[in-house]
Amino acid sequence: MSSSPKPEVRSYRNYIGGQWVKSSTGETFPVYDPSTEEVIANVAAASSADVDRAVGAGRAAFDSGPWPQTTAQDRGRILFGLAAKVRENAAMLAELESRNTGKPIVEAEFDIADVATCFEYYGGLANKVMGNVLPVPANALSFTLREPVGVAGQIIPWNYPLLMAAWKLAPALAAGCTCVLKPAEQTPLTALEFASWLEGVGVPPGVVNVINGVGETTGAALVAHPNVDKIAFTGSAAVGKLIVKSGADTLKRVSLELGGKSPNVFFADADWEAAVDGALFGVFINQGEVCSAGSRILVERKIYSKFVEAMTEKTKRIKLGPPRERDTKMGPLVSKEQYDRVTFYLEIGKKEARLAVGGSRPKQFSKGYYIEPTIFYDVDNSARIAREEIFGPVASVIPFDGEKDAIRIANDTPYGLAAAIWTRDIYKAFRVVKSFRAGIIWVNHMQPTYVEAPWGGYKQSGFGRELGPWGLEEYLETKQVFVNLDETPIGWY
Ligand code: NAI
Ligand code: MG
């Protein structure tokens, strides 16, 4: 265990209209280090009055503030400025992200690098938003304008805190929107540090507001607010459904990136070493707290027993440890709540299937929300551990017989975020790629994510796409303009 001195417990306010604002009710909530279970910060809880103030600031900055007058080129420069701040402060941000989420420091460093890359990508895209000229059959000029959708409410989860903020803020700002961001109540700290650089790089007051609090109050107030034009949400399917219902009252634009129960499918002809590795990486990276986790591992029966054995042996060697130690491969889960939820599924799994490895709290830690990486096998695809998102280091291994059976099982899920296939047969690979009902497909890999490529799901994994030009589209309206060039009257009446 590291013996470095405890960092001070810091206090944070909400960032509204370019000011650090206390809660109108004076309320604060604690934020924890899940590896020590200690409080590391206190954060002002935004009441509905604070949400109203933040939306008002976003509204004013959009309707009458300087943001609409800022050129696309200048918005792009500002995004590059934010990326530079993230790169300059990468070590601090990675440390804080790791401390607050429990994720291994090496993974946090990757996340923070991706945050900067995301701002750079959308910085570059800001002045490449273009309309079309349309060949209408009239003596006229018909064209489209692409305009920002307005004030965007952005609600994000705790598994990749600053990266999820970047996926939402960067395209919104590139499009010319203003933002009210609500981080997850478990992990608000990196977004608040980030907010402290906004003014310095030229983001006008009110263009980005960061408000904190639990979903049921702060989040719900943002979704219901009549002056918010769009909600972008990443989180559970249950809350996604609530957001669609609540947003319906004001017909908000809604984009949703929800969870999954993504299949990771291994054929007998797959490269053995790569396959065993890929199965574990797909489900255990970030403690399994990943929306695209390959939590259903489908294995062709010919290699099934050997594959389960190989995964089991390798899993026993995964190094759980304190998140800031560089050789740690798995830290604690993010919170007591998540620990309890995953523990609940471990008990269900022990009744529904056979346990190959893991299944409880590792004995070497007296504190922290650690869970052993766990593999259940002989899982039936109708079992709860095969249907419900667990969001922890828990794999369900399911045997299959041949291609048709694999596709049937893979698609037999309410979700459709991601899927992967491992084989050396390109005919089979592409047939299966086409058959998968999911928004993200990997062949002979699982999880690589690039800002250039679209991210989002089919079915109950949500709608809309983040990243790439698709991510920008979510923040744009299309206005069609018709300019009559014929000076004769219409002459109808
Ligand atoms: P959640 O969906 O409740 O929380 C995600 C975000 O939504 C947080 O910022 C939260 O404050 C906000 N929120 C919650 N209720 C809200 C409401 N009524 N109105 C507006 N905003 C609301 O997720 P939670 O409770 O942290 O985790 C539960 C499960 O959700 C996990 O076990 C996992 O299965 C899934 N999940 C999926 C994620 C993904 O990336 N797709 C991320 C986090 C959780
Ligand atoms: Mg919740």
Image (cartoon, helix red, strand yellow):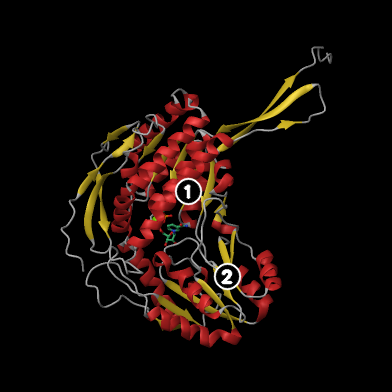
Q: Amino acid at mark 2?
A: Asn
Q: Quadrant of the N terminus?
A: bottom left
Q: Residues within 10 Å of mark 1 (few under 14, many from 20)?
A: many
* Residue 252 in sight from this viewpoint: no
How many badges with numbers are in the image?
A: 2
20 shown above or below 283? above
Relative horizontal placement of residue 175, taking residue 344 as reference (left or right): right
Q: Nearer the viewer, residue 113 or 465?
A: 113
Relative horizontal placement of residue 479, taking residue 222 as reference (left or right): right
What's the residue at 40%, 55% (across, down)? Answer: 111
Residue highlighted by disc 1: 233
Q: Quadrant of the C terminus?
A: top right
Q: Amino acid at mark 1?
A: Phe
Secondary structure under tag 1 reads: strand
60 shown above or below 384? above
Instruction: Give yes or no for contact between labels 1 and 2 (Cβ–Cβ under 8 Å).
Output: no
Secondary structure under tag 2 reads: loop
Find out if the beta carbon at label 1 lies less than 8 Å from the nearest ligand 1 atom: yes
Q: What is the x, y in percent for residue 206?
A: 39, 31
Q: Quadrant of residue 15?
A: top left
Q: What is the x, y in percent for residue 440?
A: 58, 60
* Residue 235 in sight from this viewpoint: yes
